[in-house]
Amino acid sequence: MILYDYVLSASCYKVRLMAALLDIPITLKAVNFHPEKQHKSPEMLRLNAAGTLPVLVDGDVILVQSADMLRHLVTPKNAGWLGDNPAQTEKWLDFASRLNASLGMARLHDVLMFDADIDQVRCDGVAQLRQLEEWLTEQRFDGMTFLTGAAPTIADIACFPNAALAEDGGVSLDPYPSIRLWMRAIRSLPGFIEMPGIHRLHELSPAPARPE
Amino acid sequence: MTAGIADHWYPVAMCSGISSPRDTRLLGQEITIGREGEQFWVRDVHGKTLPAIARYGHLWTSPGQPNRDLFSIPEAEAPGRRLVDCGAVRVKCSPLRAVENFLDIAHFPFVHTDILGAEPYTEVSRYEVQIREEVDEVWATKVKFFQPQAARSAAGGITTEYMYRVAAPTSAVLYKTCPPRPGEWDIITLFVQPLTEELCDVWPWMALYDDTSPLAELVSFQQMIFMQDRSILESQIPRKLPLDPGMEAPTQADLTSVAYRRWLKRIGFTYGAQVVAA
Ligand SMILES: [Fe+2]
């Protein structure tokens, strides 16, 4: 399986993370998205006429939507990752694409100077984070750590990157304790990998000093 | 703006990225850049032509009257090197903070974990720092550090040797051990365009001996490293770089930073700096 990848892309990271959690080897092909716009090059457009990243190629199968890639990576052995309630999973996959259009765009604007209506996308992003916070809080009251239940699904992996990278786009995560706990749960999954701006959990802090 | 600030050279664009005229900002002022064939030009908000130099993949200008040529990196012009444009990353931080972070090796194991540094190899051994009066630059030499993956071309952990050079107030050059070619230095620069005192575009650029890595992977590696720094840069307090000693306690690892601040103060470079009135 070959993933046409950009190291700073939240959508590419969804696929890298899912493959890592499922322990599926994928070959990464770096695409010079910034500054070269290589995803719009003739070779890349032949692969994906929409000129977006990521692109996943598995034999004859070419996928250009990250949600499809997440589904594709799940095998019958790991079917739990699709969730028990397909409608719920779909709902959150859809939510993930809205996060990409709001927080994801705010980040591209702030970091890579993309054109965007920055106030509008940040405002949309904040509204979505509040919705996510509310849902995750309810889930916790019901003893559920993840979006659709007690175990993580592709919906969690789809929503996680753009939420976790919100601050890159100038949107604070401070007001959302449930989102932060949920992110911590994802970061502690076996096989978790990081990306720039999303750190692994590591206990580097020294023990608190005793008062003199 | 004082001459101590205006009379320096600043990067304002990547040459390969300039086609039609466009506006950008330098030291809080709007400027327009463009090209006429192979000639690049820069104008200020009044339409006045500012000096322009195309070098090291970037366009350089100055709002004042630079009393010397743009610094040179002779090694970068040696044949056989790959010159890698990395594009800009925008950071909400003081331009001086961006340079200072680039000079700091102690953060490698914590920020660039398992790439530029790893636990338990967190110790920074002794190195030498000088303000070289004759060239008016800051240099740190004999910096040695264990790195799990020092460069895209490094197969495993090696002890890397570094030299750091502050060649202009917002431009720094890093010379580092070149895995495929012992005896030569790879060159990685950080050219910082000060948009305001608390906002900058950072243009990393590289001149490497590496014939095998695909260009996109070299660029990705550099952008990954820099983005790991970005969130730290944006949360540093105070926002501006304090130039007076005593604000932050220096350690062995910070000697380069101390020299950088001392040098900025000596040359009167206070843009993006916090200066405590005497
Ligand atoms: Fe760094």
Image (tube, rainbow, N blue to C red):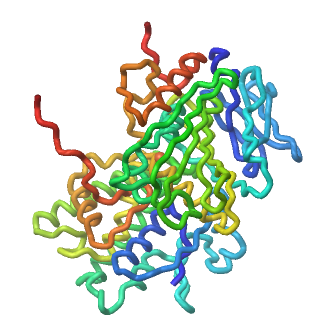
Lateral position of residue B113 relative to residue B28, left or right: left
Q: Please state, as top left, top right, bottom left or bottom right, where the C terminus of chain B lies in the image.
A: top left
The residue positioned 21% from the left and 57% from the top of the image is: A178
Seen in the image, is A143 located left or right of residue B133? left
Residue at 56 percent across and 47 percent down: it is B89
In percent of the image, x 27 and y 46: which residue is there? Answer: A174
Position of residue A76 relative to residue A178, above or below, is below
Of all residues, the one furthest to the top in this rendering is: B278
> Image quadrant for the N terminus of chain B?
top right
Q: Is residue B76 visible?
A: yes
Work out whether residue B14 or residue B210 is closer to the camera in this orientation and state it: B210
Q: Quadrant of residue A20?
A: bottom left
Residue B203 in view of the camera: no
Q: Is residue B132 left or right of residue B240?
A: right
Across and down, in percent, residue B73 comes to 72, 40
A113 to B258, vertically: above or below: below
Q: Is residue B57 left or right of residue B171?
A: right
- The one nearer the camera, B237 or B148, is B148
Residue B156 position, x and y percent, is 49, 65
- Vertical side of B271 occupied by B79: above or below: below
Question: As rendered, which of B182 and B60 lies closer to the eye?
Answer: B182
Q: Is residue B22 above or below residue B47?
A: below
Instruction: Identify the residue shown where x is 57% and y is 92%.
Output: A60
Q: What is the x, y in percent for residue A107?
A: 47, 52
Q: Looking at the image, how many numbered discs can be counted on the residues?
A: 0
Q: Position of residue B214 (x, y in %)?
A: 65, 68
